[in-house]
């Protein structure tokens, strides 16, 4: 503890929780300073100030960016002129920095109403967001910012902290309750995050008209308004994220993540959702807030059975996975001679596992009790213990996102990928083939919607690929496309063998051995004796390996579904390596 006069600062990190600073009895991020917080509370506010006031992770950056475009001539974001230099967080930078700003000033604060410096003439934009999405966004933010020292933090821990108000700036409910008596004041504008998502143009115009005639005139110009809308679209804001927050202060994950209302359903359990509902009603019953997020906060009956089987630290996994195994797998120490086969589910994992085993393991043989998964365990299902028992060099399988996969600069990573249309059809059959009565009657249309919303186990196909593809331009990574294996299996096996090197390279240089591996790895050969891949007790009577034929998706998709997926694909992969990978395979026309 540091004591200065009557002031005190304590920076601590209880076991399992993020590091935080307690400044005079209030919680703040661990890198905040007593003198900055105190001087910000005592700041003199001018009548021409604009204050963007929010509880954290409710849309602050979004509204700051819009206000800057509306009010600052020459506003441009570049290294050294990030957003926070135009609109500083007053309690972080302190009063001295704010006083040096040119007027009119745009100030940002997460202070509660009592702590926020005020002036009756200053304009305050209060940005609000439903508590469930706020909670999830806060969780990811806290794992992403280096100062919290909480990269592998657990969602359930954060959920309890959020509900108890034991997070920086205190409780969500207390914050909003403090503002309730003042939201109809003439100098206060309330902007809801969900309204901005639903109609960005209307929200920008509303903000401009609130700020005054000059900004209202700006949005009356269709060209200027169009430029602001284009620059403020969430997809645009996800690019070049160092504009908002310097990379040195955060990890490689996105500062602006999804931004999609309802993403909380991929994280909260039913019990957690109901707890937030009870707290919300307790604080806001019979207030203007009561009906603001009625639809956004609905659980939607049946979603859990059809979608998230379990949630661990904010991420979905199939039913039957053990949280302790998932966590131990994330913490597994990768070894320099490890081979990781990493894929989104149903993209060719088993096929490549079988090939790699034949290339690397001398006594590799599949039989009852020695199925494929015993040779190449899925680490998040089996836990770290299964990997630790494997003889080196280990062959390990995972569907983990990049952020959760164990890493070593010398380990080898084979990333297997497949066009999303065939992947969704294969995932659909895998789901209805499980020994679960509640899955048996899911229609393809239902499953397609789940897939598109990222509600299939392991989360979004698009987010998964985008995250991995940012990290695959390295000597120790090989991308293998399912469709290339169909077209030229021998060429794909040779490519894998050359990448692995050592014994695997020797094997592919022996023509007889190579031909034997090709023969045993054809799709028709692999469809025989399918208990080799996964025991029958874990699956239904249908085939684990079904067709494997590219473009089988055309037997399931409507034209509308095909167009919808094409649009989603283009939005996520435009300008990156995957953009043209499946141009032919994804065409509707033959």
Image (cartoon, rainbow, N blue to C red):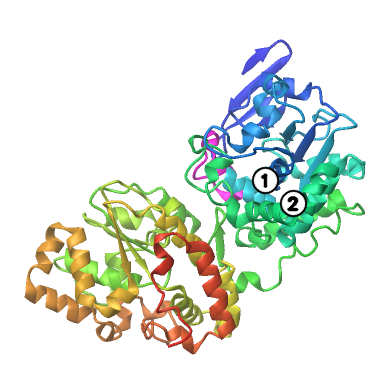
Check disc 1 and report the residue beneath it.
57
Q: Nearer the viewer, residue 52 or 448?
A: 52
Classify mark 1: helix, strand or loop: loop
Which residue occupies 68% across, 18% down? 35
User: Residue 358 location, x and y as percent?
Assistant: 19, 70
> Badge 2: how crowded within 10 Å, few (<14), some, or many (20+)?
many
Say which residue label 2 marks: 129
What's the CA distance linking mark 1 and mark 2?
8 Å
| Residue 193 part of the magenta-drawn span | no
Q: Nearer the viewer, residue 351 or 64?
A: 64
Q: Which residues are the magenta region?
A: 142-156
Q: Position of residue 393 (x, y in %)?
A: 21, 55
Mark 1 near mark 2, Cβ–Cβ under 8 Å? yes
| Residue 480 location (% of width, % of height) | 31, 67
Q: In this rendering, is residue 188 above or below 382?
A: above
Identified at 21% across, 66% down, the residue is 495
Left or right of residue 471: residue 109: right
Q: Residue at x 85, y 53 (%)?
A: 289
- Quadrant of the rendered image containing residue 264: bottom right
Q: Quadrant of residue 215?
A: top right
Instruction: Locate the N terminus by quadrant.
Output: top right
């Amino acid at each position: 503890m540091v004591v200065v006069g009557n002031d005190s600062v304590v920076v601590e990190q209880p076991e399992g929780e993020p590091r935080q600073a307690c400044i005079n009895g209030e919680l703040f991020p661990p890198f905040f300073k007593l003198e900055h917080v105190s001087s910000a509370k005592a700041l003199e506010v001018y009548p021409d100030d604009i204050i963007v006031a929010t509880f954290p992770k409710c849309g602050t950056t979004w509204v700051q960016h819009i206000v800057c475009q509306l009010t600052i001539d020459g506003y441009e974001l570049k290294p050294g002129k990030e957003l926070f230099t135009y609109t500083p967080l007053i309690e972080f930078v302190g009063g001295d920095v704010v006083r040096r700003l040119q007027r009119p000033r745009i100030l940002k604060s997460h202070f509660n109403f009592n702590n926020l410096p005020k002036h009756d003439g200053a304009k305050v934009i209060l940005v609000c967001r439903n508590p469930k999405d706020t909670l999830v966004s806060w969780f990811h933010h806290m794992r992403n910012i280096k100062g919290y020292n909480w990269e592998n933090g657990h969602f359930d821990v954060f959920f309890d902290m959020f509900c108890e108000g034991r997070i920086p700036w205190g409780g969500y409910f207390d914050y909003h309750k403090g503002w309730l008596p003042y939201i109809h004041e003439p100098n206060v504008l309330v902007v809801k995050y969900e309204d901005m998502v639903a109609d960005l143009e209307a929200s920008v115009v509303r903000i401009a008209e609130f700020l005054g005639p000059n900004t209202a005139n700006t949005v009356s110009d269709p060209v200027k308004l169009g430029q602001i809308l284009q620059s403020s679209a969430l997809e645009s804001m996800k690019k070049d994220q160092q504009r908002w927050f310097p990379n040195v202060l955060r990890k490689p994950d996105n500062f602006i993540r999804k931004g999609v209302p309802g993403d909380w359903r991929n994280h909260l359990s039913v019990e957690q959702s109901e707890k937030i509902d009870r707290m919300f009603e307790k604080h806001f019953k019979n207030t203007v807030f009561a009906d603001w997020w009625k639809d956004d906060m609905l659980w939607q009956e049946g979603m859990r059975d059809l979608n998230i089987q379990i949630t661990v630290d904010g991420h979905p996994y199939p039913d039957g996975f053990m949280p302790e195994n998932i966590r131990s797998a994330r913490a597994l120490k990768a070894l320099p001679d490890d081979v990781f086969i990493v894929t989104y589910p149903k993209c060719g994992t088993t096929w490549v596992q079988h090939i790699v085993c034949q290339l690397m393991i001398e006594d590799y043989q599949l039989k009852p009790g020695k199925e494929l998964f015993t040779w190449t365990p899925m680490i998040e299902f089996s836990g770290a213990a299964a990997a630790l028992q494997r003889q080196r060099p280990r062959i390990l399988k995972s569907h983990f996102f990049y952020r959760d996969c164990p890493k070593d600069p010398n380990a080898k990573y084979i990333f297997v990928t497949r066009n999303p249309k065939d992947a969704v059809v294969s995932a659909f059959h895998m789901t209805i083939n499980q020994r679960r009565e509640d899955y048996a009657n899911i229609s393809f249309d239902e499953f397609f919607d789940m897939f598109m919303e990222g509600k299939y186990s392991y989360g979004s196909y698009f987010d998964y690929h985008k995250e991995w593809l940012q990290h695959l331009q390295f000597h120790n990574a090989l991308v293998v496309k399912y469709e290339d294996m169909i077209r030229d299996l021998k060429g794909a096996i040779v490519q894998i063998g050359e990448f692995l090197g050592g014994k695997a390279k020797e094997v592919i240089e022996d023509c007889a051995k190579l031909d034997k591996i090709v023969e045993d790895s054809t799709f028709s050969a692999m469809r025989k004796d399918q208990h080799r891949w996964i025991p029958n007790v874990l699956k239904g009577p249908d085939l684990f390996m079904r067709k494997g034929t590219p473009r089988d998706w055309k037997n399931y998709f409507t034209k509308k579904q095909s167009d919808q997926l094409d649009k989603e694909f283009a939005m996520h992969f435009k300008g990156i390596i995957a953009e043209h990978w499946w141009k032919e395979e994804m065409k509707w026309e033959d």
